[in-house]
Amino acid sequence: MDTNLGRTFRRLRKLKNMEIKEVASEDISYAQISKFERGQTDMTLTKFLSSLEAINVTLEEFYHEAYFSNLPKGSLFNYDFCQKFEIKDKEKLQQLLKIETDLLTLHPSIKRYKLNIIQIKSQLHLIDPNMQVNKKDILYLKEYLLSINKFCAYELSLYNSCLHLLDNKTLDQLIQKIISSENGYYLNPKILKIILRLIPIFIENNFLDSLPLLFTYLESHTKSDLFFYEKVTMVYLKALYDLKINPENHEASSLLNSYAEVFKLFNTLESEH
């Protein structure tokens, strides 16, 4: 067996601040996981995938962590493999909510089910504001995201879909942690998407101190022509930021009006194609 797999799994589990008992289930015992991490035994593919799911890591991320984390930085993974279809159908979301709730009842120690429930509830709230996410769930989400030391695709997706649930200070703490850590190149598009959503929230709430750093991050990670839309959006948001600081900034005001027309064009092209 490849003992690197066990070591990588152990490292990722600890970075997610999870104990072995939180990963163990009816299918795989505490002892099996412990021996696998120490390189003393192997595990079946089914059990391995189940264990990855328990620590909220995709197979692609694990593969990258195990075999490419020590390679020189490059564009090996410069795509976002984990984009998901955003469900906006209330009935489908409620069906998913029931499935995840039943799974949590069967496996109360698996964090993923609880987090999935919160994520689904947050999307339901966007569809129907009367469907609130309770404070206890929001606190659970906040504590989980603040406790982990490595944001993978799952956490980025979770954070992105629950931005409206978290206070400005927590949002800022989390994005600082994300951009200051080593991330796989395949996660860059997802991080850029989050930042482009965060900046308008911070501007609207007059939470401006972190914005220069976020703009700097955007500039350094959107040099490729592949990020044309992100570049255009960044210029627009910069003008919005400048206008927030100085409402008499006529240049910024003019730029905002011009870019409003550009975004109308984008929306038209998107509809046509």
Image: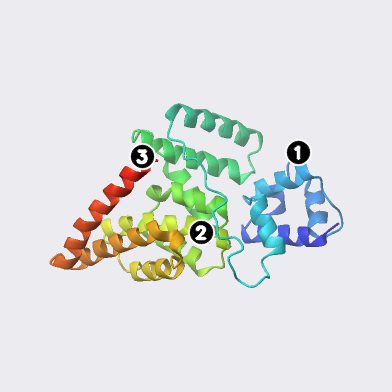
Disc 2 versus disc 1: distance between alpha carbons? 29 Å
Residue shown at 37% from the left, 43% from the top: 270
Which quarter of the image is occupied by the N terminus? Answer: bottom right
Instruction: Write down the quadrant of residue 16 in the picture.
Output: bottom right
Q: Amino acid at mark 3?
A: Glu
Q: Amino acid at mark 1?
A: Glu
Does the CB distance between marks 3 and 1 fall below 8 Å?
no
Q: Amino acid at mark 2?
A: Leu
Q: Secondary structure at mark 1?
A: loop
Whether residue 35 appears in this view of the structure is yes
Q: Earlier in the sequence, mark 2 or mark 1?
A: 1
Total number of numbered discs in the rendering? 3
251 with respect to 48 (left or right): left
Task: Residue 149: give x, y in percent of width and height.
Answer: 57, 63
Way the structure is coloured: rainbow
Is 273 drawn above or below residue 150 in the view shown? Answer: above
The local crowd at label 1, few if under 14, some if 14 to 19, many if 20 or more residues have their Cα within 10 Å, is: few
Disc 2 versus disc 3: distance between alpha carbons? 42 Å
Task: Residue 70: give x, y in percent of width and height.
Answer: 68, 70
Q: Determine which residue is flagged by label 2.
A: 146
Comparing labels 2 and 3, the label whose residue is closer to the camera? 3
Does the CB distance between marks 2 and 3 fall below 8 Å?
no
242 with respect to 42 (left or right): left
Disc 3 versus disc 1: distance between alpha carbons? 50 Å
Comparing labels 3 and 1, the label whose residue is closer to the camera? 3
Q: Earlier in the sequence, mark 2 or mark 3?
A: 2
Which quarter of the image is occupied by the C terminus? Answer: top left
Q: Check residue 26 in the rendering and tell me which mark sits there, or answer none.
A: 1
Instruction: Write down the quadrant of residue 211 in the picture.
Output: bottom left
Q: Determine which residue is flagged by label 3.
A: 272
